[in-house]
Amino acid sequence: MPILEHLWIILALPLAGAALNGLLGKNWSKTIINSIGIGSVSLAFLSVLEAIREFSLLPAGQLSFFKNYFNWMSAGSFKVDFALQMDHLTIVMLLVVTFVSLLVHVYSTGYMAHEEGYYRFFAYLNLFVFFMLTLVLAANIVLMFVGWEGVGLCSYLLIGFWFLKRSAINAGKKAFITTRIGDFGFTVGILLLFWTFSSVDFGTVFAKAANMPAESATQAGVLTWICLLLFAGAIGKSAQLPLYVWLPDAMEGPTPVSALIHAATMVTAGVYMVARMHALFSRAPIAMFVVAAVGAITAFYAATIGLVQTDIKKVLAYSTVSQLGYMFLGCGVGAYAAGIFHLMTHAFFKGLLFLAAGSVIHAMSGEQDMRNMGGLRKQIPVTYWTMFIATLAIAGIPGFAGFFSKDEILDAAGSGPNAHITLWLLGLAGAGLTSFYMFRLIFLTFFGKPRFDEHKVHVHESPRSMTVPLIILALLSIVGGWFAAPHLLGKTDYFEAFLHPVFATYGVPAGIEQGASLAGAAGEAGGISPSPAMELLHALTGPPVVLAIIGLLVAWWFYIRKPDAPKKLAESAHGLYKLLLDKYYVDEIYAALIIRPFLWISTNVLWHVVDERVIDGTVNGVATVARGVGGQAREIQSGNARTYATWVVIGAVGFTVLMLGVWGMVR
Amino acid sequence: MSVVPVSYYLVLSAILFGLGVVAFVFKRNIITILMAIELMLNAVNLAFVAFARAWGQLDGLVFVFFVIVVAAAEAAVGLAIVIRIYQNRQSLNIERVNLLKF
């Protein structure tokens, strides 16, 4: 079994690509850089496929493949290995990461063709793939943290890719620093995890956790604290309330980066982490509730901001924050499989939306404001159709990928074991808003009359390197959800069945959580179940679908039927409109509450007092004292030999007196 | 025949050494100072010899030889320096040789 035994090859390929392009690629032609960049990722993708084939040949009882390559560090009982593991959850993530990365790499050859630092871009992208795969394959939480921080680094580098642009630099810094706040919690969580379980290895930790009883829903125990601290990291990385502010700004980066890192893969790392640590989360009801609540509130909250944004990428950014909220909502109510399922479908349709938006921006020669677009449907048909499919998918129109995954999450939030009516309502409202702002985006961009100077802007369809990835992703946005089709009929869906070994291994005591909707679905199937046709009808006319269609119609009414209605509404509800347009003033509040006090303390206390007075004072003070003492002491060196002689005599006499009198050395 | 006690020699040695110290500190002529040093060295030699005799051991005598050798070397170097100083300053006053200071 070559690849499965050597999982590190999957990591080494993109790393080698990054090293080659990054260190040597400066003067290479685009052909070489492309072949290295795309080649390494496609080889990684093929390796993943081969590894999956080999994994499927493992004995049926073996749920995960674990391989320890070398001991990374070891101090007393603290031991970290460079160990990789593969199970069904890893497989899903590996496929999504390598495949979407591959498409984005191909797309980037077209999108970035005229950019400076072409080699740098591909080196960063490859490096990102390396770290993301490390995060996914890691068999212990410390190695996972390496990947976790590594993707953060690549995100920073790529947001600030145009490093001559001040706003891009600031956005990069904002992303890095904001996520660092969450990562502080993550680090403390790792320490607490090790302190509790004396191991950082996933297998060991989960096996020990499996023997622990679930904690009570009213009092926070150590598991709850570990989970909450780890979730703090996820909040930062996956842009949830209250640390979501970096993601919209991250749109300063090139659009392929937004698609890959800030939609499809990196931001979903938090969801993956929660799902990976389900053995702990499932036993910490308070943490689960926090995850679900943060997810649901974020899903709704970010969607409201998305309603009024005018920058095409900003809409998608808030949409991403909102969709990530759904994933956390799914995990939080115990439907991990549904959360991961949404992660996957979201990677397809949101990756597609960003790439299509990039294609629109490309066609408009850099214009990002939707108010200056319109009527692009005929000129860039491929972009239009693919983006339209993605919109149908994200809005949750039946048959498309997003419908299945979102439906499952809302199902679990509404009727699963940890369900709560408020969570369900928030999710539902968010779904309606999602549909509205997405169709608003489509109508503003592609319908109506052009609102730009058609003589100046030469609208053109993107090259094939960009449209082919769009088409592939559009296909996946349709069929990507069909794994879950049986869910509609009240049966166990294939995706959940696929992930079932992972989430069932570390079984949870009865009464708290039971593989969530899986158990629910099985129960329904076994008990008094309505006929499949009724189930199907129920799902297709359920509240999410109704709301999605209402969202569509409202958007159509506002932006096609009565194009001046939005303006009137904005004027009549001016306060609310302004509040949404200015994103609830969260950036301003953070600036006033955190950044400015921090800056003030840093400047007036840490800089002017601590640094200038205390530290500089100490250093200069030591020097001043030394100089003063020296200035006095050097008078002794008079140059007069007789003075020296006198000192010698005084010393000799003094020493003799000491010896004889004081120390009593007389026999 | 009565033997002169060691303490006599020691007292003489101390007196000679004290004279040497006083001369070293208070005299200004460099040659005199060198002579004072010689006096102190020889006072010590006397003490060594006296102890060697008193304890019946040779260690003290060996030391004396070393001291004499060092003293000879010191005198040679010292007088050479004195000559150079005189050539430079036309004086042997130690107080005028005071440039080596802070």
Image (tube, coloured by chain):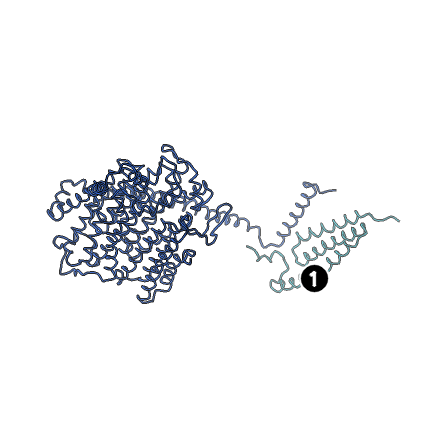
Q: Is residue A144 above or below residue A113?
A: above
Camera-side residue of A288 and A33: A288
Q: Where does residue A577 sit, x and y in percent of width and height?
A: 18, 42
Camera-side residue of B35 and A36: A36
On the rendered image, what quadrant is the C terminus of chain A found in? top right
Give the blue chain's letter: A
Q: Tell me the colour chain B is drawn in.
A: cyan
Q: Is residue A549 above or below residue A125?
A: above
Q: Residue at x 67, y 48 (%)?
A: A652
Q: Secondary structure at mark 1?
A: helix
Q: Is residue A363 visible?
A: yes
Q: Where does residue A33 sit, x and y in percent of width and height?
A: 33, 64
- Residue lying furthest right in this view? B1
Q: Is residue A409 left or right of residue A636?
A: left
Q: Residue at x 37, y 37 (%)?
A: A284
Q: Where does residue A632 sit, x and y in percent of width and height?
A: 53, 48
On the rendered image, what quadrant is the N terminus of chain A found in? bottom left
Q: Is residue A204 left or right of residue B83?
A: left
> Which residue matches tag 1?
B73
